[in-house]
Amino acid sequence: MRPTHWLTTVVLGLLLTGCAGISTAPTPEARAALAPTGKLRVGLQLGSPHNVITDSVTGEMKGVGFDLGKELARRIGVPFEPVMYPSVGALLDGGKSGAWDVAFVGFSPARAKEWDFTELHLQMEFGYLVPAGSSILTMADVDRPGMRVAVQEKSQPDVFLSRTLKSAAVIRASSLVGTVDTLKSGRADAIFSIKPSLFEVSNQLPGSRVLDGRAGVDPHAMVMPKGRDAGLAYARKFIRDAKSEGRVTAAIERAGMRGAVVAPLE
């Protein structure tokens, strides 16, 4: 390659790199809205691979919300600070008191009245988990008189189940761990939740089964407290980019999630 051609190539490469950096960097106003304390505080529900789990071998934290939150903090140039909660109800209560800046939760019109959402990044199947030796073989076997279904209160599965279950009784617990305790103690015959969480639970309960089929789909998105409009456009672009760049797919695979897919680009 002639020296002049080589120099031109280098200069063009530097210009393109610079332009890419400028296009992805937030404005000072957007950064202040996204991370008003100087850190990006990311609200995460423990034990759920769509948010965050701990690798049983390495102790490493991973999960779709964890990975995306860490990447968003890197892009806006601030430290990443995970804020952990045992349940989605506790997480949302924490957001109301200003304890976090972004989180990753199920979308619903009711929640959209209280929070600002990006476009969807995940779609997760609803399903049932039954213990070892259960006579329940299919989802149709669950909704019968005398059956008891455990669900995490104030969650999207709770909303869905309350609307669709006709004959079985609903047993509510304050967290996903609480639903597992209800099943272990024999006070429930099945757990209803999103399948990624159920598969995670099944790893801890020998002989338990996640039933085939799906009862519905739970759409998930990144959420911010209202009143931070200066950062919302950047957050929405970040989620679109994370999907198109394959980052959401990579986070799903790193967490070993089953029963979830990347939401289509809107």
Image (cartoon, rainbow, N blue to C red):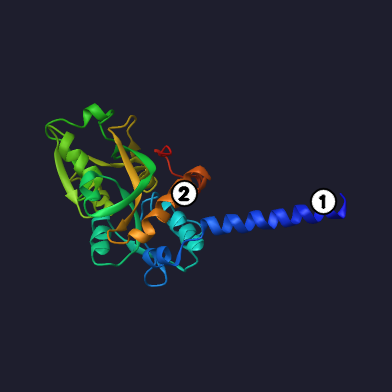
Q: Residue drawn 25% across and 41% down?
A: 192
Left or right: 28, with 3 as reference point: left
Give how far across and how far down residue 65 sits, in percent: 41, 54
Three-letter code, disc 2: Ala
Give how far across and how far down residue 23 sits, in percent: 53, 55
Circle 2 crowding by C-alpha within 10 Å: few under 14, some 14–19, many from 20: many
**Distance (Cα) linking label 1 and label 2:** 45 Å
Query: Which of the labelled discs sits on residue 255, or is there none?
Result: 2
Which residue is under mark 1?
5
Q: Residue drawn 24% across and 48% down?
A: 155
In which quadrant of the rendered view does residue 189 lie?
Answer: top left
In which quadrant of the rendered view does residue 168 lie?
Answer: top left
Q: Nearer the viewer, residue 229 or 156?
A: 229
Whether residue 22 is visible here, answered yes or no, is yes
Secondary element type, mark 1: helix
Circle 1 or circle 2, nearest the eye: 1
Secondary element type, mark 2: helix
The C terminus lies in which quarter of the figure?
Answer: top left
Whether residue 44 is visible here, answered yes or no, is no
Residue furthest toward the right? Answer: 2
Q: Residue drawn 36% across and 56% down?
A: 232
Give how far across and how far down residue 43 sits, in percent: 34, 60
Q: Nearer the viewer, residue 188 or 140?
A: 140
